[in-house]
Amino acid sequence: FFFWQRREAPMATTTTTMRLGLTSLLRRSLSLASSLESKASSSLRVPNLVTSSFHGYRQGHGSTFERSLATSMLSMEQQGGGVGMMEGGFIEPRDPKTRKREGFPTAHKRCGAVAMKCGMTREWDANGVGVPLTVLWLDENKVVQVKSVEKEGHYAVQVGASSRRRKRLNKAVVGHYVKHLGKEAEVSRKVVEFKVTENCLLEGGKAINADHFVVGQLVDVQGTTRGKGFAGGMKRHGMKGGPASHGTTKAHRTIGSTGQCQDPGRVFKGKKMPGRMGGKTCTQQKLLVYKVDPVHNLVYVKGQVPGGKGSYVTLVDSKIAFQDVALPYPTRAEEGRQTEVTVAHASMKNNPFERYYK
């Protein structure tokens, strides 16, 4: 049975074929489970058998994950549709033992969010280790425009954050919001476009809240660095500079030689020299979402984020790392909204008792 599963799963090259394959696999596993239940003894665990038909390689990876997956797939079957018939769901993480061979998942690409940097703070985890955190505020994130392949040539979602007074904008900008959201729509202060897949499209006016992100996941944060003005080579590029003594005259912080002799007789392009520093787009990758506060729409990420207080940054799912938690797509449903603050588990790598006392 598992041999058939491993041979059939890679054949799903398109999204439609993959959905049909999962639906047929679910029905066959359910029929197999029901037949074995009538023949086997009372100690047979049917839910684990049903789950293993989808994730047979995850034996021993945690029954909570398997039970949640089996429950979600059984609810899909009871509603009379497959995975493609549902408006949304969860992107399940791949098995750490086999995900490198399977490759990076590309079936789902969720929409990101626009956040305002509020500053940095620190919290202590269960091991007593301080965790540096950056506080990001998702201020009135909503979908402004939805783009499709038929009209614009690609699937994308425009997300706006905060709000502005209409009298400070021209008619072209205001008309964009009136066209897509109606006459009474509020004009956003910051608008960013995110490319998504077809199954992760959102409708116009849909709100994106802090619980769109899950504690434990990895995100990429992009923003504009602080402008430093014109800086020298030592500050801008970390150069060593000249000797501090022994005959050095007015050349303590110079960059030194910038080229060769008559051949080539010029300075190569891209030479590190003094110039304007900062004020450029920078992306911090693989930042851990440590804490999510859905009440105040705050997302706490571990580490530093480019930009100063009050600047806008974009949050998207990490493009270079595998996720270890299930992510809701296209976003979290209204009936499944979180109402309490969630915090990630303490890392065992920073456990001082494991490091010093064992």
Image: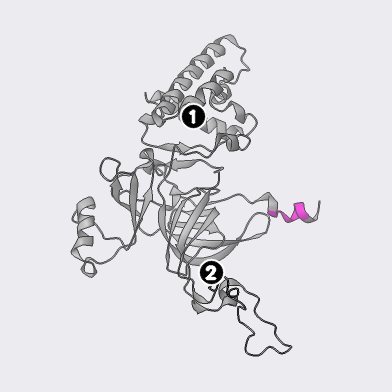
The residue closer to the viewer here, 121 or 106, is 106
Q: Which mark is residue 268?
A: 2
- Residue 240 in view (yes/no): yes
Other residues around mark 2 within 10 Å, as few (<14) / some (14–19) / many (≥20):
few
Q: Is residue 232 left or right of residue 13?
A: right
Q: Quadrant of residue 129?
A: bottom right
Identify the image quadrant of the N terminus: top right
Spot occupied by residue 230 in the image (x, y as percentages of width and height): 49, 79
Label 1 element class: helix
Above or below: residue 52 compared with residue 307: above
- Residue 76 in view (yes/no): no
Decide whether the magenta segment is chiefly helix, strand or loop. helix
Q: Is residue 132 left or right of residue 156?
A: right
Instruction: Residue lying at the far front in this picture: please name it.
Output: 262
Q: Quadrant of residue 253?
A: bottom right
Q: Nearer the viewer, mark 2 or mark 1?
A: 2
Q: Residue 23 colored magenta?
A: no
Q: Which residues are magenta?
A: 350-355
Q: Quadrant of residue 297?
A: bottom left
Above or below: residue 299 compared with residue 150: below
Which residue is pictured at 52% across the width and 14% down the height?
32
Spot occupied by residue 304 in the image (x, y as percentages of width and height): 55, 63
Q: Which residue is mark 1?
A: 71
Instruction: Residue lying at the far right in this picture: please name it.
Output: 358
Q: Which mark is residue 2?
A: none
The residue closer to the viewer here, 12 or 182, is 12
Q: Amino acid at mark 1?
A: Thr
Which residue is pictured at 56% across the width and 12% down the height?
36
Q: Amino acid at mark 2?
A: Phe
Above or below: residue 48 compared with residue 167: above
Label 2 element class: loop
Q: Is residue 263 left or right of residue 114?
A: right
